[in-house]
Image: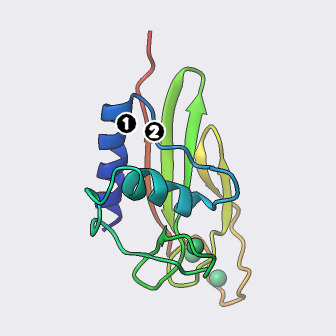
Amino acid sequence: MLKNLAMMIDAYHVEHGAYPPDTNSNMGSSETLYYYLCVQQRAANENIYPAFDANANGLMEFVSQCQRILLYARLKEGNREGYVLIDPGQDGLLGGIIDPQRGFISDGSDANRDGIPDDKDNLIESSLDPEVK
Ligand SMILES: [Ca+2]
Ligand SMILES: [Ca+2]
Ligand SMILES: [Ca+2]
């Protein structure tokens, strides 16, 4: 479940005082997340969520049950920090953009022209810390 992965991100935040990076050299965001939660932490987090090298570049990434690559981004709004984690669903399409402050924003697009907005089947976990005074 996506929630399990979100819990791992929260645990990382508690331990490191920051959310896992969303970019690392030429890795995709899901590969970067896998790297920080699994590779760097040495197997302690294995089997929390399906991972597979779906784009065959030699680096593992978190993938949904239908083998779609997840998207992950850190958020920052003022002094509040957070993240958004997205399973693009069966269609594998995001149907919007990831705003670095507000997280996922639907654009209502229907790139696969099935009459259904592409973000309709997305699963999203998102968190933004309370304002630090
Ligand atoms: Ca990969
Ligand atoms: Ca979708
Ligand atoms: Ca669609």
SS label for mark 1: helix
Where's residue 101, x and y in %?
Answer: 62, 37
Q: Name the residue located 42 percent from the left edge and 30 percent from the top edge.
A: 129
The vertical placement of 32 against 11, above or below, is below
**Nearer to the camera, 132 or 28:** 28
Q: Amino acid at mark 2?
A: Tyr
Where's residue 11, x and y in %?
Answer: 29, 42
**Nearer to the camera, 42 or 36:** 42
Where's residue 85, x and y in %?
Answer: 48, 56
| Quarter containing the C terminus | top left
| Quarter containing the N terminus | bottom left
- Quadrant of ligand 1: it is bottom right
Q: Are marks 1 and 2 in contact (CB under 8 Å)?
A: yes
Q: Seen from this angle, which residue lies furthest top? A: 133
**Nearer to the camera, 66 or 37:** 37
Residue 19: assigned label: 2
Where's residue 84, x and y in %?
Answer: 50, 50
Count neighbours of disc 1 (C-alpha within 10 A) and say few if under 14, some if 14 to 19, many if 20 or more: some
Q: How many marks do you count on the picture?
A: 2
Q: Amino acid at mark 1?
A: His
Task: Give the distance between the C-alpha atoms of the residues marked 1 and 2, in whole angstroms.
Answer: 5 Å
Based on the displayed image, in which of its 4 quarters is residue 56 positioned?
bottom right
Query: Which of the marked residues, 1 or 2, is nearer the chain's N terminus?
Result: 1
Q: Is residue 30 left or right of residue 47?
A: right
SS label for mark 2: loop
The vertical placement of 58 against 17, above or below, is below
Disc 1 target residue: 13
Q: Seen from this angle, which residue lies furthest bottom? A: 114
Based on the displayed image, in which of its 4 quarters is residue 59 positioned?
bottom right
**Nearer to the camera, 100 or 39:** 39
Q: Name the residue located 51 percent from the left edge and 84 percent from the top edge.
A: 90
Confirm if mark 2 falls within 8 A of ligand 1: no
